[in-house]
Amino acid sequence: MADANPVKSMDSIMSLCKRRGFIYQASEIYGGINGFWDYGPLGAQLKKNLREAWWQDMIMNPCWGRKGPNGERVRCVPVETRIIQHPKVWEASGHVGGFNDPMVDCKACKARFRADHMWVAGFADLGKAEGVNERFPEFPLALYEEAKASGNPAKIMEAVKEMRTVHRLDAMLKEDFQKPRFFKTAVGGSLNEAAEQLNLSKREAKAFITPVVAWAGSLADFRSIVGEGAPCPNCGEANSLTEPRQFNLMFKTIVGALGTEDDKAYLRPETAQGIFVQFKNVVDTTRVKVPFGIGNTGTSFRNEVTPRNFTFRSREFDQAELEFFCHPSESQEWYKFWRDFRMEWWQSIGLKSENLILREHAKDELSHYSVGTSDVEYRFPFTAPGYGELEGIAHRGDYDLKQHQEHSRQKLEYFDTTRGEILPNGGKKGEKYLPHCIEPAAGLDRGVLALLCEAYTRDESRPSPEFLKLHPRIAPVKAAVFPLVDKDGMPEVAEKLYDELAAKYGKVGFIETDAKQSIGKRYARMDEAGCPFCFTVDGQTLTDQTVTVRDRDAGGQERIGIANVSAYLAEKLGV
Ligand code: ATP
């Protein structure tokens, strides 16, 4: 039986993206620049639609008009803050001091890994290898020994997998984990990736995989964690890993003409800090009352050490972030509310629930300030069967406002007139506090990538075997109007319908028209662009004023009155 959810080929998706003008390599005619991607006509509109859906559902009509845990409508306002902020903003936020990734290089193959993405698979000493078959007769000792002797991580992982799936490794781990390590190997990837690669549950993975997370010491310390002579995860060369070194991910620039160190500034690594910095202005100049949110969208920059996986990890990308400010006593409820809504939202624009998970971070994964964090994760083809982060929803407490209050020496407290004891005149005394903050932080480029991966469909039985099942709300081309043939009065009728639709719906996406080529080829082009509806004017139109409407996903057609096309489209697009 065919796999109901086969892993899609990233090469095919990337080639469709290029061929149809969704995503191009930046500066391609000069050979490209690593970690930067441009959007072509369809990609630019797709990304705009995603941003606008976010803007609409988070700011203009937050949570589709749903009531929050306080029983009232959710209220949010936007800001648009600059890429370059005062350098002290980044000192206060902790980015200048702490936004570092320790990296490990391989001296042999020059590959570079994030130290906290290295992990070490260690086997318990199974009561001396010789004895193991007595207790576990089916244990593939030869395979294990051979892999171990090869020092080749890929081979070792194969052996680990084999042992896990066939030979009750779970039981062995439980009994023997405390014993000395049998062997150690360092492998690139996150702990979750490790667990997924080895087909282990997270709990099992934790038992025998050690992430090199909190590395802060010398090469000797590093070696004591990864093991003497640990091979490079990429080329397998033993003893070739350098000690981890710090790399700051912030892009530096110079403001003004003098160009001295004092004029140094940074390109923002996230849009969120702009919100905290303007929190007081928004409170003082508008009628917002806690609880409320401030949204900000725009470009962020991170000098990622290893940009990879198409646009997933880029050096320049767009974010859509909301900071929702609330009273500390209500923050847990708001955290759960936003976490659940954000998961629902991604599903509403077309990401299927079987490819999406909400992963609550374990306590030891949380940043020092975070009270709770969940990630909405999508099963990208390059992470499958595992998942990659699409959006993080963090309960940040009052960390950011407190930091900015301290560094700027400006009071950022909020005076809440709805709280405090009741006064003799019946009013409330009020309460001053630093609001707590819930932050749903989404990446628009990762969002576009997830939508494209989800939409990409192959069906060899169709004349256009590759097509994009994009949700109508997000699709860059909303509809196409075709005359069946380029004669007999059909082009004139089609053009009139096109004019009407373009005037009405051009604001949400492209309306296409094309009279050349066979109708099959024109449909195929629209399928590849993810256009959900094609209206075709044919011979019958001229007699009974109906057109065909073709459904992209089912390929079927029905006839509707030409006068009803606009209303039909409005309903389907939800505009
Ligand atoms: P990661 O662990 O993948 O580096 P992060 O946890 O550092 O991500 P956040 O700081 O929470 O990411 O940023 C919020 C969102 O911004 C992420 O969920 C992601 O969608 C997006 N994002 C972060 N870094 C990148 C990047 N280098 N390229 C594209 N999108 C990114």
Image (spheres, grey):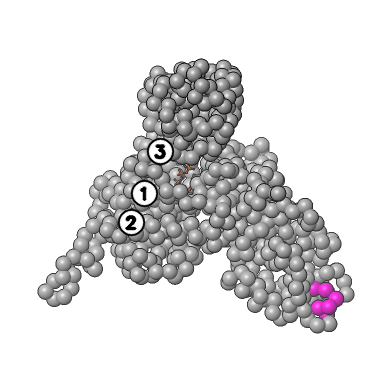
Q: CA distance from mark 3 to mark 2?
A: 27 Å
Residue closer to the observer: 419 or 199: 199
Residue 129: image location, x then y, percent: 50, 18
Residue closer to the observer: 91 or 61: 61
Q: Dot 1 surroundings within 10 Å: few (below 14), some, or many (20 or more)?
A: many
Which badge, 3 or 1, comes first in the chain's sequence? 3
Residue closer to the observer: 451 or 184: 184
Residue 545: image location, x then y, percent: 78, 81
Q: Dot 2 surroundings within 10 Å: few (below 14), some, or many (20 or more)?
A: some
Residue at (88%, 75%) from the top-left corner?
Answer: 488
Identify residue type, mark 2: Gln
Q: Which mark is residue 476?
A: none
Asked if the residue under mark 2 is in contact with the one under mark 1, i.e. CB atoms within 8 Å, the reply is yes
Q: Quadrant of the C terminus?
A: bottom right
Q: CA distance from mark 1 to mark 2?
A: 9 Å
- SS of the residue under disc 1: strand
Residue at (41%, 21%) from the top-left corner?
Answer: 180
For the residues carrying marks 3 and 2, which lies nearer the camera in this image? 2
Which of the 4 image quadrants contains residue 124?
Answer: top left
From the image, tell me which residue sits under label 2.
332
Residue at (85%, 62%) from the top-left corner?
Answer: 518
Name above or below for residue 294 compared with residue 565. Answer: above
- Please say whether residue 84 is visible from this viewpoint: no
For the residues carrying marks 3 and 1, which lies nearer the camera in this image? 1
Identify residue type, mark 3: Phe
Residue 504: image location, x then y, percent: 63, 73
Q: Which mark is residue 372?
A: 1
Q: CA distance from mark 3 to mark 1?
A: 20 Å
Magenta span contains residue 539: yes
From the image, tell me which residue sits under label 3.
99
Name above or below for residue 341 compared with residue 176. Answer: below
